[in-house]
Image (tube, rainbow, N blue to C red):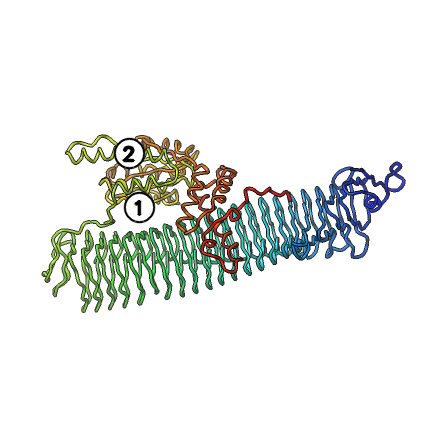
């Protein structure tokens, strides 16, 4: 490599150049051109592999374009370089630096002002590509666009800033590819980054601040994958997808968008994990047309419109996510949309927690809806499945089935300002299990023409009736349990003809109230353990015990037993299910030992011998995704099979489920959660959060004290499992003297190794009719070996996410085949892995 020196006229020794262009023409490929400080007005053309650098470092050399429309630097050769230089363009609307098709440029510690950095690639990749690397550079004061990559361009940007652009910060078009790390965009009048055509963006640890329009805009068939991205105060949407574009975001934040936080329309696909959308000026998430969105471990806070709005034929799935605050609905689904909510929380929204209208299909599983106007509302034509869900603290109705079809399974409605559940005219509703408690109105209202099927539901302490049937209503009510109603437990209007069978009424103002012309049928029902029948005289009083005249087939004298779960499972099958789990060898041994111990206890009880002192409560210590919830659910079923628990069901809670927001709220809230677990297992996730460091007057201490008392009062009717990070569970146990005596056994859930993670992926593949090739399996194991195992590692969840990403990539690959075979449709190959393990990682 030869060094060429450029100095002002009258300076420098023999052999130095006084114009940069002269030094470039004299340089051979690979030579270095060193430029003395000063301002140089030239229009350079780099047509060979030369590197230009400022002799005295960044800012000492200013290269400015002469008047006209030529860039200050035109790169027409491969492997060119600019180091420590400031480049000024002559026209802010034109390129200050232009990289031509097939050329290559590395810029380090440079500034480009007064014009854009324009990089053109060939029209087709078969003609080659253009390469660009920017490190620690700054692009500012351009018009239309700051950085434009067009065509077959491969670019890498590290620790760079694009600022003060009267237009879009970065534009990718054609088949451009950009890998950006620590990119900062601010003060752009247009969007932050715009992708068009078949462009691809991979971005991490970056920030888009104060863009005039969308933070990230995708069009056509473009794709963006991001992690650690912060989009703050965009003038329109935070992320906006159109066409058939795709976005995957992880660990990102969208703050204060002037419009929608996340917007997807047309045929786009949005996948978001561990992200937050805060204070959007419209919806937090808006999905329209045939777009799809999947959000996992996300948070949508304080949206000005509905937090989630789905319309058209859109599909939305939210998993383990939280919607909090907002001026309208938590989730609003209209038209022919499909919305799935699993393990989510929706609270503190001004209107409805979940609203489904038109022909929308909604599935809600394992969710909490609290402190809303109405909890869940289903309109005419909607189809809803709600299971293992809690609706509490609503100002008005808990669940309103205003039309369509609804199946409510093991749903718990509590503390509503009005009725617990309302089934409107012409609605088709099925209610299976669950509870309705402490409502400000009636527990269950059935309006004229509605005929729901209700089985095994408990209605407790309603301010008015337990069940109110309007004139002409009907339905079947089996194993219904009404306790503590302020009005008649059952009210039947004129011409209403419900069937009540094996129902139990206790401690109510009256058992049955009827209007003239009512025709209820009662079979095997009781009121305070006395038979409840309906005849020609006045309805009986449950408190007096007067059952009234007997009708044919009078009820038997004893109350129907609680029927929560009639399915019997064998101990051998359950142990087989436990041992079929991937990994967890130590946990399996510990659970097996506990089962043997419990068998002995059961046998002693059956023999009339006293049971030995025994604490059945457990601590599960392990990182996220290690199977704690799965094992807890199995443990409850095992104890039910042993006859040591009545139901064996699992109720999963966390701090938000137990701790109130004001004085006097925590005790009842903890008690309600505990009561739901009676006969089964109360699983407290992240239990250490009830005893934060320096707790002081934290309400978590009240929740712990309440739990300790309830565990003593119901020590034979519930199992409590406290779960969390291994290092934090000692603090929880030490927060109350009563915990140490009740939690004497800890099961340690170790992280999965790579082979076990591969087995989880293979299990997921088998469940969904996919098969991994041997090479794909081998490379998948190597990929798991490379994954960092820090706090963000999700163990089994990471394996499931890996499987999902492989299937999406496989779908893209198979879609390009004109007539795929059945084997091609089910085969996952090594090329479907997110990162090809055998391929070298490019630096640019």
Dots 1, 2 in contact, CB < 8 A: no
188 sits to left or right of 762: right
Q: Residue 519 falls in which quadrant of the image?
A: bottom left
806 sits to left or right of 413: right
Q: Which of 249 and 561 is in front in this view?
A: 249
Residue 568: image x %, image y %? 24, 46
Residue 534: image x %, image y %? 14, 62
Label 2: how many residues lie within 10 Å, few (<14), some (14-19) or many (20+)? some
Can you tell which mark lies on residue 142?
none
Q: Which of marks 1 and 2 is in front?
A: 2
Find the distance from the CA under tag 1 to the CA under tag 2.
28 Å
Up-down: is 498 above or below 669?
below
Q: Going 57% across and 54% down the picture, which residue do you hit?
A: 223
Mark 2 or mark 1, which is nearer the start of the sequence? 2
Q: Going 24% across and 59% down the picture, which residue do you hit?
A: 467
Q: Nearer the viewer, residue 709 or 93?
A: 93
Residue 488: image x %, image y %? 21, 58
Label 1: how many residues lie within 10 Å, few (<14), some (14-19) or many (20+)? some
Which residue is the site of mark 1? Answer: 672
Residue 485: image x %, image y %? 23, 54
Q: Going 29% across and 52% down the picture, which residue do you hit?
A: 434
Q: Nearer the viewer, residue 542 or 85?
A: 85
Can you tell which mark lies on residue 594?
2
Instruction: Name the secondary structure under disc 1.
Output: helix
Up-down: is 582 above or below 364?
above
């Amino acid at each position: 490599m030869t060094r060429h020196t450029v100095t002002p006229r009258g300076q420098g020794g023999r052999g130095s150049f006084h114009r940069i262009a002269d030094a470039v023409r004299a340089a051979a490929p690979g030579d270095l051109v060193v430029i003395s400080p000063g301002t140089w007005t030239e229009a350079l053309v780099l047509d060979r592999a030369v590197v230009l650098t400022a002799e005295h470092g960044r800012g000492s050399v200013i290269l400015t374009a002469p008047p006209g429309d030529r860039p200050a630097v035109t790169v027409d050769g491969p492997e060119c370089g600019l180091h420590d230089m400031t480049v000024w363009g002559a026209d802010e609307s034109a390129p200050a630096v232009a990289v031509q098709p097939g050329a290559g440029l590395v810029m380090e510690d440079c500034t480009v002002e007064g014009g854009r950095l324009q990089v053109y690639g060939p029209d087709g990749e078969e003609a080659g590509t253009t390469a660009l690397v920017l490190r620690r550079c700054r692009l500012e004061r351009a018009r239309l666009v700051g950085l434009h990559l067009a065509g077959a361009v491969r670019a890498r940007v590290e620790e760079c800033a694009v600022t003060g652009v009267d237009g879009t910060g970065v534009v990718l078009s054609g088949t451009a590819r950009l890998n950006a790390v620590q990119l900062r965009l601010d003060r752009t009048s247009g969007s932050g980054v715009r992708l068009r055509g078949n462009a691809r963006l991979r971005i991490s640890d970056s920030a888009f601040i104060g863009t005039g329009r969308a933070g990230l805009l995708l069009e056509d068939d473009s794709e963006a994958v991001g992690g650690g991205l912060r989009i703050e105060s965009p003038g329109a949407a935070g992320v906006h997808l159109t066409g058939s574009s795709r976005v995957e975001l992880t660990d990102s934040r969208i703050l204060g968008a002037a419009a929608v936080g996340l917007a997807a329309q047309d045929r786009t696909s949005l996948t978001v994990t561990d992200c937050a959308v805060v204070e959007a000026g419209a919806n937090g998430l808006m999905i329209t047309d045939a777009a799809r969105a999947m959000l996992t471990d996300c948070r949508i806070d304080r949206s000005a419109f509905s937090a989630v709005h789905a319309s058209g034929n859109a599909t939305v799935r939210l998993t383990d996510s939280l919607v909090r605050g907002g001026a309208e609905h938590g989730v609003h689904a209209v038209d022919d949309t499909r919305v799935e909510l699993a393990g989510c929380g929706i609270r503190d929204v001004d209107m409805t927690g979940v609203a489904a209208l038109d022909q929308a299909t909604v599935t809600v599983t394992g969710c909490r809806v609290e402190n809303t106007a109405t909890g869940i509302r289903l309109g005419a034509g909607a189809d809803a499945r709600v299971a293992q869900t809690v609706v509490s603290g609503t100002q008005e109705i808990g669940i309103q089935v205003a039309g369509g079809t609804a199946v409510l399974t093991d749903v718990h409605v509590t503390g509503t300002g009005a009725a617990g559940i309302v089934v409107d005219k012409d609605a088709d509703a099925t209610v299976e299990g669950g509870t309705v408690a402490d409502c400000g109105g009636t527990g269950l209202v059935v309006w004229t023409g509605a005929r729901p099927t209700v089985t095994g539901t408990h209605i407790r302490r309603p301010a008015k009736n337990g069940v109110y049937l309007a004139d002409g209503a009907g339905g079947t009510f089996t194993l219904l349990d009404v306790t503590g109603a302020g009005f008649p437990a059952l009210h039947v209007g004129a011409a209403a003809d419900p069937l009540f069978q094996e129902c139990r009424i206790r401690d109510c103002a009256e058992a049955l109230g009827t209007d003239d012309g009512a025709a209820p049928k009662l079979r095997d029902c009781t009121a305070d353990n006395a038979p409840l029948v309906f005849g020609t005289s006045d309805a009986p009083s449950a408190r007096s015990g007067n059952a009234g005249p007997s009708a044919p087939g009078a009820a038997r004298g004893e109350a129907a037993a609680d029927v929560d779960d009639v399915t019997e499972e064998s101990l051998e099958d359950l142990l087989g299910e436990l041992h079929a789990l991937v990994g967890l060898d130590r946990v399996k041994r510990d659970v097996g030992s506990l089962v043997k111990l419990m068998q002995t206890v059961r046998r002693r009880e059956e023999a009339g011998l006293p049971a030995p002192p025994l604490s059945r409560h457990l601590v599960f210590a392990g990182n996220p995704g290690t199977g704690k919830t799965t094992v807890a659910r199995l443990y409850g079923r095992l104890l039910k099979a042993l006859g040591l628990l009545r139901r064996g069901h699992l109720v999963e809670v966390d701090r938000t489920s137990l701790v109130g927001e004001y004085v006097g709220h925590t005790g009842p809230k903890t008690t309600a959660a505990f009561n739901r677990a009676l006969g089964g297992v109360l699983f407290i996730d992240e239990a250490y959060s009830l005893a934060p460091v320096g707790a002081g007057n934290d309400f978590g201490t009240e929740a712990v004290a309440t739990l300790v008392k309830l565990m003593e009062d119901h020590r034979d009717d519930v199992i409590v499992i406290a779960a969390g990070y291994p290092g934090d569970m000692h603090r929880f146990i030490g927060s109350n003297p009563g915990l140490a005596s009740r939690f004497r056994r800890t099961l340690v859930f170790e992280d999965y190794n790579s082979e076990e993670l591969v087995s989880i992926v293979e299990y997921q593949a088998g469940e969904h009719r996919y098969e991994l090739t041997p090479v794909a399996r081998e490379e998948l194991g190597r990929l798991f070996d490379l994954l960092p195992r820090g706090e963000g590692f999700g163990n089994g969840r990471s394996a499931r996410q890996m499987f999902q990403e492989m299937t999406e990539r496989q779908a893209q690959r198979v879609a390009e085949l004109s007539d795929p075979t059945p084997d091609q449709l089910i085969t996952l190959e090594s090329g479907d892995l997110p990162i090809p393990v055998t391929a070298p990682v490019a630096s640019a």
